[in-house]
């Protein structure tokens, strides 16, 4: 039998910490003191559980204590995060809830909304992105705030609390933006479908001239009168620029 590599031992070690009953006959475990292994397992589990508790306070509060503990335990045994950072573990937990319907019907979306607040705190703000001091000009090079996360939800995640838990999806999607301003304050804005389309187009680009963006809109929304559509979009972009969601890009 070929000798396993150190990398393979590392991977098996982590998997053993998550599910020790699967590795009772592994010969390499003989080299590790059982007491020390138990300490590693407890530290890893407790750290990840604390991360999850901190990242999803609303979801935790809404979930029965026993059910919350069981959900974290099942996640712990299955996840394989490529990132050691807090937001990486939180993102993996969101993905877990999206594929395991074991909590509330809105649990995965609420978790994503709570994760977004953490994620925008970690995103960098490039130095060449500046807040417009005046109205945007047609030749202005603009971009979506690089910290922004634009999302569409089937449940009113921004309203969920101990007093209100929706029992069915909304008739229309809820469009929300989470972002960080240049004072490092995390902000939340609810937007309509038109603005969602506009910002999604911006989110897919590093930057674009305002005029070029306005020229794209009639192709995306041919049912709207061209002039009315472009005028409304320009007003919306200027309003969002005042909220530091739309920024100018220095060449």
Image (tube, rainbow, N blue to C red):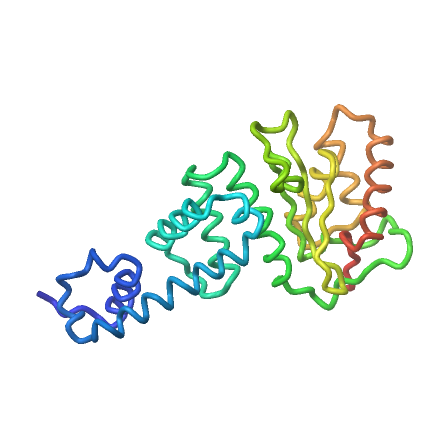
- Is residue 193 toward the left or the right of residue 113 in the image? right
- Is residue 8 toward the left or the right of residue 210 in the image? left
Number of labels in the image equals 0
Q: Is residue 145 above or below residue 172?
A: below
How far across and how far down the image is residue 228, in percent? 86, 30
Where does the C terminus fall, quadrant-wise? bottom right
How far across and how far down the image is residue 73, in percent? 36, 52
The single residue placed furthest to the left in the displayed view is: 1
Q: Is residue 250 above or below residue 105?
A: below
The single residue placed furthest to the right in the displayed view is: 134
Which residue does the image show at 25% across and 66% down from the upper left?
8
- Is residue 33 toward the left or the right of residue 134 in the image? left
Which residue does the image show at 63% across and 54% down from the upper left?
117
How far across and how far down the image is residue 127, in percent? 73, 68
How far across and how far down the image is residue 96, in percent? 43, 46
Relative to the observer, which residue lies in front, 206 or 22?
A: 22
Where does the N terminus fall, quadrant-wise? bottom left
Relative to the observer, which residue lies in front, 39 or 179?
A: 39
- Is residue 61 toward the left or the right of residue 163 in the image? left
Where residue 43 sits, quadrant-wise, is: bottom left
Where residue 45 sits, quadrant-wise, is: bottom left
């Amino acid at each position: 039998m070929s000798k396993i590599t150190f990398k393979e031992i590392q991977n098996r070690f982590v998997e053993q910490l998550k599910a020790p009953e699967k590795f009772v006959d592994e010969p390499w475990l003989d080299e590790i003191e059982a007491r020390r292994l138990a300490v590693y397992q407890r530290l890893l589990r407790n750290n990840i559980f604390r991360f999850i508790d901190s990242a999803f306070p609303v979801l935790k509060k809404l979930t029965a204590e026993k059910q919350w503990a069981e959900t974290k335990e099942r996640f712990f045994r299955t996840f394989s995060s490529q990132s050691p950072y807090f937001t990486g573990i939180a993102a993996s937990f969101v993905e877990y809830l999206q594929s395991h319907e074991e909590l509330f019907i809105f649990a995965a979306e609420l978790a994503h909304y709570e994760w977004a607040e953490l994620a925008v705190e970690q995103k960098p703000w490039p130095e060449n992105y500046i807040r417009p001091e005046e109205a945007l000009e047609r030749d202005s090079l603009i971009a979506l705030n690089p910290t922004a996360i634009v999302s569409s939800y089937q449940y009113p995640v921004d309203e969920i609390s101990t007093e209100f838990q929706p029992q069915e999806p909304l008739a229309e999607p809820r469009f929300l933006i989470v972002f960080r301003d240049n004072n490092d304050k995390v902000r939340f804005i609810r937007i309509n479908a038109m603005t969602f389309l506009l910002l999604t187009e911006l989110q897919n680009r590093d930057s674009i001239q305002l005029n070029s963006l306005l020229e794209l809109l009639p192709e995306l929304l041919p049912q709207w009168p061209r002039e009315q559509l472009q005028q409304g979009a320009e007003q919306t972009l200027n309003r969002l620029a005042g909220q530091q969601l739309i920024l100018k890009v220095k060449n």
